[in-house]
Amino acid sequence: MTVEIYEPAASVALACFAHPDDAEVLCGGTLARLAAQGARVVLVVATRGDKGLARVDDAEERRTGELLEAAAILAIADVVQLRYGDGDLSNDLELRRRLVTVLRSFAPQLVLGPDPTTVFYGGRLYNHRDHRELGWALLDAALPAASQPGYFPEAGEPIGPLEVLLAGSEEPNSAVDVSAYLERKVEAVRQYRSRLGAADGVLADAVVGRAVDAARSVGIPGAAELFRRVEGAG
Ligand SMILES: [Zn+2]
């Protein structure tokens, strides 16, 4: 698949991911760029991220604090937490109703989320269930549910068609130049101290390396983030 340079534009952009830190790692540069362009950027985090830490007594508070610090660095305007437990996401009616409610209340033109078709990473790893379930639920909530009044009539007024950018895709077709926002992305990722511990330098290097490789793969200097872009479905 050919990967083309894509210039994101929206007055409202909504990113929805399963865990705290998913959005920053996968598309933090694009979110910072959209905010710098004047978009209202909304971040919806579906789970508490509570099982990713060794100590679980104060995991939720710590992860929420880090999430808000990271969001501030990216100039994200609104953070919505759905507060599911880690591993509890299913693409069911209740999750879709909650996602449709959020989509209708912010009425974005651009939605960013995880590509649910990403299952295996070669022969070594496979994708977290929460990422897959949330990705499908978000797609199903965005189209057709959010735009058609017959779906979840209690969840607000239907919104117009959406453009969708799916991050973490094995089949990207679009690259967003985030060269001017790479430092901010790294800084946002580094806020997740409770997960990173002593590995924070390693992760920062990995984030930079991936962004530089993404830019190189589409023949531009600097840094990029790759997406599967779905235009105007609805
Ligand atoms: Zn995750």
Image: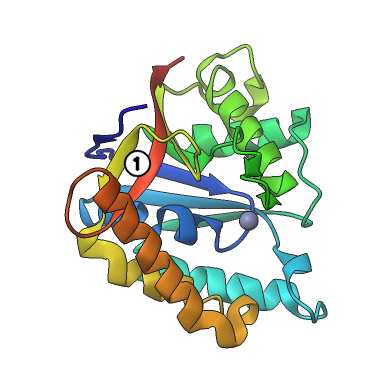
User: Which residue is drawn at the image coordinates 76% and 34% (left, top)?
Assistant: 94
Q: Is residue 108 visible?
A: no
Q: Is residue 129 visible?
A: yes
Percent coordinates x, y for residue 176 in the rendering: 28, 45
**Residue 75 figure quarter:** bottom left
**Residue 223 figure quarter:** bottom left
Name the kind of residue labelled 1 in the image: Val
Percent coordinates x, y for residue 118 in the rendering: 60, 38
Percent coordinates x, y for residue 10 in the rendering: 28, 38
Q: Nearer the viewer, residue 81 or 223?
A: 223
Q: Nearer the viewer, residue 198 or 232?
A: 198
- The residue tagged with tag 1: helix, strand or loop? strand
Q: Is residue 56 above or below residue 88?
A: below
* Side of 93 relative to 230 (left or right): right
Q: Is residue 21 above or below residue 60?
A: above
Q: Is residue 120 above or below residue 183?
A: above
Q: Label 1 belongs to which residue?
A: 12
Ligand 1, by image quadrant, is bottom right
Pick the quarter of the image with the N terminus: top left
* Side of 146 relative to 164 (left or right): right
Percent coordinates x, y for residue 210 in the rendering: 39, 59
Q: Nearer the viewer, residue 99 or 231?
A: 231
User: Which residue is drawn at the image coordinates 64% and 17% (left, top)?
Assistant: 151
